[in-house]
């Protein structure tokens, strides 16, 4: 009969039910830090019962049992293991709230039992807590920064621990995500036309994260940003090209960087053999991302770290933001390290109303008698100990004076700005400038043009 043919066998239904229950989370997950000592002491019985509850996912019941053990048997030899088991139960439970509780418990365990072997494991779990909550590069980087700090702390406090290699690789993955975020921000500023801001971000990426998978691309865009800001940044652009050739010899930009250095009449460095071997290893062991994985990554919460470095020492210093090139560094002629901005306490309450605005009066250069720092009048010192301010330079061709003049001219050039003028306004300004600079015809030449015309006598 058709009904009998479509009937499900009872054994098959039971097997399917068992498989469903097993897949649903009722499977037992073995605890990592059990006590293998075979004894029937009351505290050991309580600990074993709590471990059994942890393995079966009954975390709240396990914590109640462990707290009973700690409060009842305050001299038990299982106190440290019980405190660690409470932290592990919060860690296994998962979720932002449970992980916050687990972090606090692991920190307490390190504080009370710093010499136990499980202290390094506690620090590794704290690193994993923030590593699992890490966002993608274009989102909030708070968890990534916390994970970086905790993994770095594990390597500093427990360098010989068995968890150190795993923490080192996690640190490379974390820094790959952080560098990717900085790199995307720099590319955005460069596309927008804010080259000082782009150079500031790209310089931080190249200096702080040399193991970044796109560090050579960051250096290439950094050099291009310096070139777009004018000739005064030629040295910085050449330094970026030099780093590409030397530190990233297998980059796609090596040939172009070499040509740029030759055009600048700069020496082309030799490739670093250690850097060459490292890049070769990374390119050979980098995982390929399939089109399907690339599409699925858009729906995942965690960032993609398959391009992260697999070798090399990660950066052990925190990333400190630098000052963009559009911000003046120091007053011209002032003491080295002095800032343009000074702070002082005003005792006169009417100073803001009576004194002029400091922003309207540029600072004067030292030794120029009140001449503004951006003025074309510059006091050029002459070589020689006994030279006077009015003495002529010793070289007859005046090359030293020309060199000093060009340096002063470069220093007096306005700093680059992040606010680019719209193209329509630039075109209009250039047109007005060309019209203003166009020489006008002399009046003496214009007069004969009107008088050369033959006169015609009007009839009387």
Image (cartoon, rainbow, N blue to C red):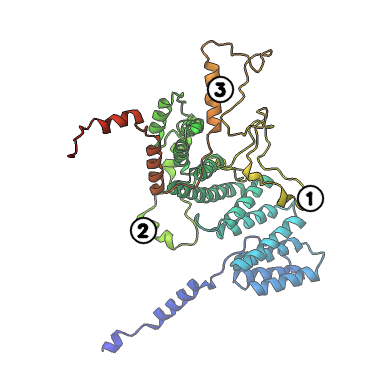
Label 2 crowd (10 A; few <14 / some 14-19 / many >=20): few
Relative to 83, say whether 437 is above or below. above
Front position in the image: 236 or 16: 236
Please name the residue shown 46% across and 32% down the image. Answer: 241
Separation of residues labelled 3 and 1 (CA atoms):
43 Å
Q: Residue furthest front?
A: 460
Please name the residue shown 69% across and 47% down the image. Answer: 157
Tell me the quarter of the picture where residue 133 sits. Answer: bottom right
Please name the residue shown 67% across and 29% down the image. Answer: 369
Relative to 360, say whether 124 is above or below. below
Front position in the image: 6 or 397: 397
Label at residue 348: 1
Label 3 crowd (10 A; few <14 / some 14-19 / many >=20): some
Image spot of residue 182 (x, y percent): 52, 48
Q: Which residue is mark 3?
A: 404
Q: What quarter of the picture does the C terminus occupy? A: top left
Q: Residue furthest left?
A: 459
Separation of residues labelled 3 and 2 (CA atoms):
61 Å
Label at residue 292: 2
Numbered disc in front, either 3 or 1? 1
Lower sequence index among marks 3 and 1 = 1
Q: Element type at marker 3?
A: helix
* One can see residue 45 in this view: no
Image spot of residue 258 (x, y percent): 41, 29
Q: Element type at marker 1?
A: loop
């Amino acid at each position: 009969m058709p009904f009998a043919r479509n009937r499900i066998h009872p054994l098959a239904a039971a097997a399917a039910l068992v498989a469903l229950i097993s897949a649903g989370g009722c499977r037992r997950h073995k605890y990592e830090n059990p006590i293998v000592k075979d004894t029937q002491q009351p505290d050991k019985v309580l600990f074993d019962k709590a471990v059994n509850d942890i393995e079966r996912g009954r975390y709240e019941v396990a914590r109640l049992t462990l707290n009973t053990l700690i409060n009842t048997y305050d001299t038990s030899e299982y106190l440290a293991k019980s405190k660690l088991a409470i932290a592990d139960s919060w860690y296994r439970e998962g979720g932002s709230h449970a992980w916050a509780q687990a972090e606090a418990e692991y920190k307490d365990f390190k504080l009370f039992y710093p010499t136990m072997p499980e202290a390094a494991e506690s620090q590794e779990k704290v690193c994993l807590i923030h590593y699992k909550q890490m966002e993608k590069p274009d989102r909030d980087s708070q968890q990534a920064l916390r994970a970086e700090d905790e993994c770095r702390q594990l390597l500093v406090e427990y360098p010989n621990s068995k968890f150190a290699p795993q923490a080192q690789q996690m640190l490379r993955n974390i820094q790959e995500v952080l560098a990717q975020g900085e790199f995307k921000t720099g590319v955005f500023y460069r596309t927008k036309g804010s080259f000082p801001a782009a150079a500031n971000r790209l310089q931080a990426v190249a200096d702080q994260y040399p193991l970044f998978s796109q560090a050579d691309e960051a250096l290439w865009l950094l050099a291009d940003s310096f070139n777009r800001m004018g000739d005064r940044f030629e040295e910085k652009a050449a330094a970026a090209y030099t780093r590409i050739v030397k530190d990233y010899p297998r980059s796609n930009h090596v040939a172009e960087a070499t040509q740029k250095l030759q055009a600048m009449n700069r020496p082309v460095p030799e490739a670093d053999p250690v850097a060459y071997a490292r890049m070769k290893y990374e390119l050979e062991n980098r995982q390929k991302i399939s089109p399907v994985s690339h599409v699925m990554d858009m729906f995942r919460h965690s960032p993609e770290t398959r391009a992260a470095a697999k070798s090399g020492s990660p950066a052990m210093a925190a990333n400190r933001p630098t000052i963009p090139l559009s911000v003046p560094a120091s007053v011209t002629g002032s003491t080295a390290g002095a800032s343009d901005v000074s702070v002082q306490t005003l005792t006169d309450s009417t100073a803001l109303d009576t004194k002029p605005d400091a922003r309207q009066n540029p600072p004067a250069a030292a030794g120029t008698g009140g001449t503004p720092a951006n003025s074309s009048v510059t006091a050029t010192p002459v070589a020689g100990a006994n030279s006077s301010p009015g003495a002529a330079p010793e070289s007859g061709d005046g090359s030293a004076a020309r060199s000093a003049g060009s340096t002063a001219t470069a220093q007096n050039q306005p700093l680059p700005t992040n606010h680019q003028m719209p193209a329509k306004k630039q075109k209009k300004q250039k047109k007005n400038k060309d019209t203003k600079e166009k020489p006008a015809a002399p009046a003496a030449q214009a007069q004969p043009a009107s008088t050369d015309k033959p006169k015609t006598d009007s009839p009387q």
